Every structure is written in C-alpha cells, then in structure tokens.
Amino acid sequence: MIAGILFAVFIALMLIGVPVGVALGIGGTVAIVLSNLDTPWYGLLTVPQNFYAGLAKYPLLAIPMFVLVGSIFDRSGVAKRLVDFAIAIVGRGPGMLPLVSIAVAMFLGGISGSGPACAAAVGAVMIAAMSRAGYPGSFSASVVAAGAATDILIPPSVAFIIYSVLVPEASVPALFAAGMVPGVLAGLALIVPAVWLSRKHKMGMLEAHLPRPPFWKSLREASWGLAAPVLILGGMRMGWFTPTEAAVVAVFYGLFVGMCIHRTIKLRDLYVILREAAELSAVIMLVVTLAGIFAWALSTLSVIDPITHAIVNSGLGEWGVLALLILLLMTVGMFLDGISIFLIFVPLLMPIAKAYNWDPVWFGVILTLKVALGQFTPPLAVNLMVSCRIARVPMESTVRWVVWLLGAMFLVLVAVLVFPQLALWLPHKLGY
C-alpha cells in the first residue's frame, strides 16, 4: 500500500507540473513518513542523510566542470572554426552542410559531453549557414538536435557519469570506452537520412555556389579545437588524470583557447558563463540528490524485488523483457529528460539486468542510447528545444524530419542489442 502511495504521489505531482526532482523528493519523503508512523520524526532523519549521501560522490564533481566546459566552448569560437575546416574537407553541395553539422557535433562530444550545450554551439553556427544555403529551418533544427544527441555517447559523457554513480560495477573509464563505437555509429547512421532527405527534397541548392574555405588556413584555425579531445581523452588513457580531473583540465584549456588564442571570450563574459553553468549544474545536482531519497524509499519498502520477480517470471524470455524495457523507456523518454530517466529507472532495472546476467557496462550503453533518442523526440526534447529556439520554428514542424533521424539511431540501438561487442570490444581491448 505504501509503495502504491509512493508512485501515486510522484505521478500526481508530475502531472500537475511539479519539477521532477521535487516530485521524487516529496514522494520518497511521504513514503518514509508513512512507513514510520510510530516514530515519524525518527524516520524523517533519513531524508537529509540520503539527500547528502546522493550528493557526496566523487564522480559527481565532474558534472559541474563538464557543464562549464560546454558553456565555455559555446562562446570560444571553436565550433565555427571546426565547421569551416569540415567544409574545406567535404566541399559544398546538397547535403554537405547537414553532414558537417552532425560531424562537428560528434567531435564536440569529445569535449563537453552535454547535448544541449553542443546543440547551442553548433546550432548558432550551422542553422544560419543552412538557412542561407536554402535549407528549411525545421530541417536544420532537426539535424542539429539529432547530431548533438551523440554527445552523451561519445566520451566524456555526463550521462555515463550519472550511471556509474548509480551502478558502481560500471566504472567511468569503461563506460567512456564503451560509448565510443556506438556513438560513432549513431553519428554515421544520422548522416545517411540527413544527406538523402536533402537531395530528395532538393534542399540546399544554393550551397554549391557558396565559397569553399581554404584547407590549410581552416586547419590552422581549427587546430586548437581539434587538440581538445586528444588532450582530454588521451590524458585519461595515459593516466595523467582521472575523468573528474579531466573536466577541470578541459575548463582551463577552453578558457585559454577562448581568451588567449581566439579572443572571443572577454573578462566580462566570465560572469555570464559561470552563472549559466552554475544554474544548470545546480538543477542537475538537485535532481540527483532528491532522487536519492526516492531510491532509498524504494529499497527500504522492498518495492524492487517483487517487480523484478514479476518481470523475470512473466514468460516473455530475455529478448521479450528487453523489448518491453526499450518500449517503456522510449515512451518515458518522450516526457522525461535523460538524467531523470536514469535516476528513476536504473534502481528498478539493475536487479532485472543481474537476473539475466547482462553486462552492466553494455546495459548502460543501451540505456544511454535510449536517452540519446529522447533528446530529440518530441514533445520534451531538450536538444530540439534549443535548436528550434535558434531556428525560430515550432517543434511540431520538425516531426516530418525527426522521424527519419530517430529511425536511423534506433537501428544502431538494435545493432548494439544484437551484437553487444559493439559496446564491449573497446573497453575489453583497453583492459577496463
């Protein structure tokens, strides 16, 4: 009965518009009080304890830093120079600018690890360029949002850090390595429909008449941006610093490039950058800590074991259960952001994964692929919200284009489901 009240309070609060973090915290608190009616004040002592326990985890220190990296590179001018370099390589023509948009978004994924930050950085440059070349704003917004969704798969990734906190068996380096191949495959899969749709609907016909940037000049200007993921990921691989320390290195590197090399960041810009990063980090961390109360209530009320037992013994089999979970998460992903999905469902899903002996690293990649899909699936698609705002188009106008891109990334999800080594080969090769 108390377990039913726990979910009823959480869902009711969500339906009336209460932020997801607050709904998680209140739902968990109500359940804790009801389960300790004889000593309610004693029960309430567990609320601040679990609030702090949810925050006091070393890997979480990386999140504010990577969020700050996203804000810095958004203003550093790196995205524009990477775009010019990519155009210098692939040239001009119908479908080339969408290809460049996705390729640059994938590359920036090796710097910030934040989909919305990447959508803002790439969208600020590419949506205007695609508009001048004759692409509709709704198509440009769809391509940028989908390309930015690869950022949470290509390391470093905020989503993988959250997952590693919830599942200690999956280390951050192993998850970072596991996300590389699926992330690249997702980007390549998105390029196919983006280029095909451009040519089929004769979009970007003006693109061929635009000048092509000179190769060597573009390479020289983009070199500082090209070096960023090599420094961050190479430093982690060489053992120079941990993923958390890598985020701090990335912050100072981004500030150096933006303030000293490209000189696109002034001293007066630092306050705005730090304020934006602090606000977004505070929201993420607050949701994480309040979810700790909800997770503790689930654990102490023994809600998880009956659900696990019912699903495992449902007669669906391993593949049937996987299909059911993907369908559930795809539906939920249309309404909740990725971090909330992890915090709500990972404590429920991990016992099922253990019952079937699924590799926790592989399972984390599967869940993150689903989150990536949700980042550009209407009606709540954080990347799509950013790109639509830049393109000044309503989100509903993007649906005719988004469905093709969703289908392409879904095929990658199916491939990783059927062939787990796509995710596990690289971490095994690197010894994680």
Image (cartoon, rainbow, N blue to C red):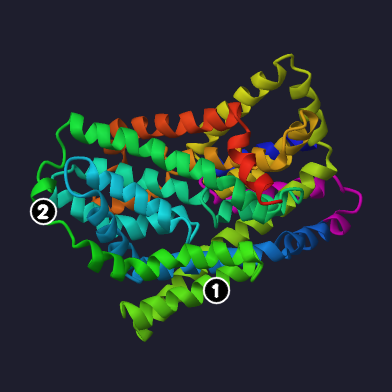
Marks 1/2: CA distance? 38 Å
**SS of the residue under disc 2:** loop
Q: Quadrant of the N terminus?
A: top right
Q: Nearer the viewer, residue 364 or 306?
A: 364
Residue 253 drawn at (x, y percent): 47, 75
The correct choice, above or below, for 234 with respect to 429 in the image is below
Q: Is residue 178 above or below residue 401?
A: below
From the viewer's perspective, tell me whether residue 297 is left or right of residue 128.
right
Task: Read off the magenta span.
Answer: 16-43
User: What percent of the width, then of the height, locates residue 199?
Assistant: 19, 33
Helix, strand or loop at mark 1: helix
135 in the magenta segment: no
Residue 345's quadrant in the figure?
A: top right
The tag on residue 210 is 2
Residue corresponding to mark 1: 249
When asked about the image quadrant of residue 416, the answer is top right
Amino acid at the residue labelled 1: Val
Q: Residue at x 21, y 45 (%)?
A: 137
Q: Could you tell me which residue is drawn at 66 percent across and 67 percent down? A: 239
For marks 1 and 2, the one nearer the N-term is: 2
Q: How many marks?
A: 2
Which residue is more in the foreground, 304 or 18?
304
Q: Is residue 390 left or right of residue 413?
A: left
- Left or right, 421 with respect to 375, comes to right
